[in-house]
Image: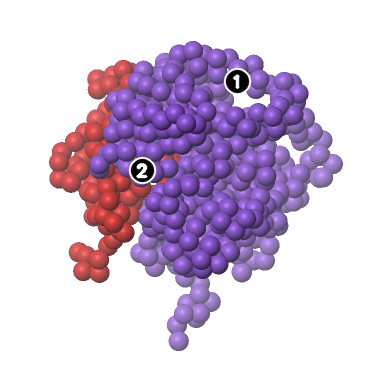
Chain colours: A red, B purple
Amino acid sequence: MFRPIAEAREGAAGTARLSFTFDGKPLTGRSGDTVAAALLANGIVACRETPVSDTPRAPYCLMGVCFDCLVVIDGIGNRQGCLVPLAEGMRIETQHGRRHLAEVGQ
Amino acid sequence: MTPVAGIEQLAESYDLVVVGAGPAGLSAAARAAGLGLTVLLADENPAPGGQIYRAITTTPVKDRAILGEDYWRGAEIVARFERSQASYAARCTVWSLGPDEASPGSFELGLSVDGKARMIGARQVILATGAQERPFPIPGWTLPGVMTAGAAQIALKGAGIVPAGRTVIAGCGPLLYLLASQLAAARCEIVAVLDTTPRANWPKALAALPDFLRSPYLAKGLKLMAATRRKLRFVSNVTSLSAKGEGTLRQVGFEQGERQGAIACDTLLLHQGVIPSVNFSNAAGCAHAFDEEQHAWVPRVDAWLASSVPGIAIAGDGAGIGGAESAALRGEIAAFGAASRLGKLSEAERDRQAAPIRAALMRLLHGRRFLDLLYRPAPQFLAPPQDETIICRCEEVTAGQVRDAAARLGVTGPNQMKAFLRCGMGPCQGRLCGPTVVELIAQTRGTTPAEVGYYRLRPPVKPVTLAELAALPQTEAAVKAVVR
Ligand SMILES: Cc1cc2nc3c(=O)[nH]c(=O)nc-3n(C[C@H](O)[C@@H](O)[C@H](O)COP(=O)(O)OP(=O)(O)OC[C@H]3O[C@@H](n4cnc5c(N)ncnc54)[C@H](O)[C@@H]3O)c2cc1C
Ligand code: FES
């Protein structure tokens, strides 16, 4: 879990808030954050489950190396949350395991 | 600088495409544009700066003392680039690089911005894709709550956030002190620093000490080390680590020789130094060698940082770890090389202009060996002794499985290991398991990483969706190749 340092707190200069949802729950994040940073700042413990054992994972490297930050954004899976800037109204969802053929095209 | 907002704004081709907007790429692009080349600088991050100067133009951290003066120096490098004539594509992932079949001697690159892909041409390419943290597989390192120390630094620089609860930092390397001091300055509650620097490294490192004593890093490094050690609880000579918890991290266990300890914590930050990120240069076909002192695979480059593939140069930490200031200088040198190969600069002029930069680079790299030798990770952290430790985070392959395949099935190299165990086949494409797989095979078979070799990687260097690929305009030749 992460928390903002004093100068990045809500209300501080340059911290416009964006609304988004994670698994349907309404949340807010700072404009300029990546999706992964916004999830961490909101105390989200895990953002994906692995395809092999369905174990929960959270962002690990925040720099595009580990792919543990994969999430579904606005219906598109396998997005690297640590590289995608948060946008107003984004629908972010946990990426559950492997994709199944039945889901394709949904 | 001309910002490129969308993929359709890119030109068909450029004299030079630079990949990566860290100090190396920013300096290379600014210099090359100054020498009259048409330049595109592409970076997958939303803002320039790379790892060290990440978010320098956008960071919410305003108190300069938190990130330190070295960080703010990045503003000059970015400002110089902004004054140049180069084009800059942010949020732009470069996923392939290969020869342009229609125009021999030139390259074709695959780029994506906002889910849209495009192929563009380049006569010269400079890869400035930087470094990544060395994998540090310990039992439990896949638990949420465990991260790299660099990740916490990125969260601080980019988003102004720090771990909320009790935080433990573990590992070794010169950056560890910097990361600990920055987080402490941002009032992160660091309950302990578990230092894994092996005592046995000292005799070898001392032999390289005289050079280090003359290096510009010495005074800075000692000051930082002393201050950090005074402020935080350091546990030295840590020989084993494990992360524990159900679903999320609760505790870190450690051994200090015979002594065992445990610390309750919410966040564990791991760091075992940085290594060049070689995925791109490897997939582009550049030759690599195992650097014994940095204990990592490093692309082979000449005095102008040209790789074994004519027309591709590699600058910055991606060509061997040297730190931010040396990355910027190596970016300049690579730009001089590219400009001269394009006939924009005579060789004599190239040599003359690059001479003072080369001299500054030599001064900076002086003393690097001492750091490499002192902070060389202990063998048990390069190749985890516990069989159950996951080494490939994507496919959840364990150290035991790799050892078994190497010993019992006689698997001799990482490419064959991939076929047997799927390690390196997940989305990270071996970025995190590669060095560990090599180490485990070398240990099990009683040989060296250099003998074992590394993954042979292929483009795309980063995953692209089929939809993006399918939407690419196809050449007639490409269509004929698949249509029957
Ligand atoms: C996590 C981390 C934190 C670090 N922090 C510090 C620090 O605080 N102080 C310090 O002195 N050193 C630090 N370093 C060391 C660092 O390597 C610096 O020496 C310096 O940033 C190297 O500069 P560079 O230009 O070579 O690469 P980098 O600064 O790493 O820049 C590389 C750039 O390439 C981009 N890139 C990579 N692949 C692609 C691709 N396929 N498509 C598009 N763009 C791509 C990345 O987004 C990145 O912006 C850190 C290293 C790491 C890994
Ligand atoms: S957190 Fe590692 S790739 Fe995003």
Residue labelled with disc 1: B221
Horizontal arrangement in the rendering, residue B348 relative to residue B84 (left or right): right
| Image location of residue B258, percent across then percent down | 47, 31
Q: Quadrant of residue A44?
A: top left
**Which quadrant does the N terminus of chain B fall into?**
top right
| For the residues bearing labels 2 and 1, Cβ distance under 8 angstroms | no
Q: CA distance from mark 2 to mark 1?
A: 32 Å
In the image as oriented, which residue stretches furthest toward the right? B348
Q: Is residue A97 above or below residue B102?
A: above
Q: Quadrant of residue B328?
A: top right
| Image location of residue B312, percent across then percent down | 66, 53
Type of amino acid at the residue the image marks with label 1: Gly
Type of amino acid at the residue the image marks with label 2: Gly
| Label 2 environment density (alpha carbons within 10 Å; few <14, some 14–19, many ≥20) | many
Q: Residue at x 39, y 38 (%)?
A: B242
| Image location of residue B72, percent across then percent down | 52, 22
Q: Disc number at residue B140?
A: 2
Please tell me if label 2 and label 1 are on a single chain.
Answer: yes
* Subunit under mark 2: B
| Image location of residue B447, percent across then percent down | 64, 55
Q: Residue at x 52, y 42 (%)?
A: B380
| Label 1 environment density (alpha carbons within 10 Å; few <14, some 14–19, many ≥20) | some
Horizontal arrangement in the rendering, residue A31 relative to residue B119 (left or right): left
Q: Residue at x 62, y 64 (%)?
A: B99
Q: Quadrant of residue B455?
A: bottom right
Q: Is residue B465 above or below residue A16?
A: below
Give the label, 2 or 1, closer to the camera.
Answer: 2
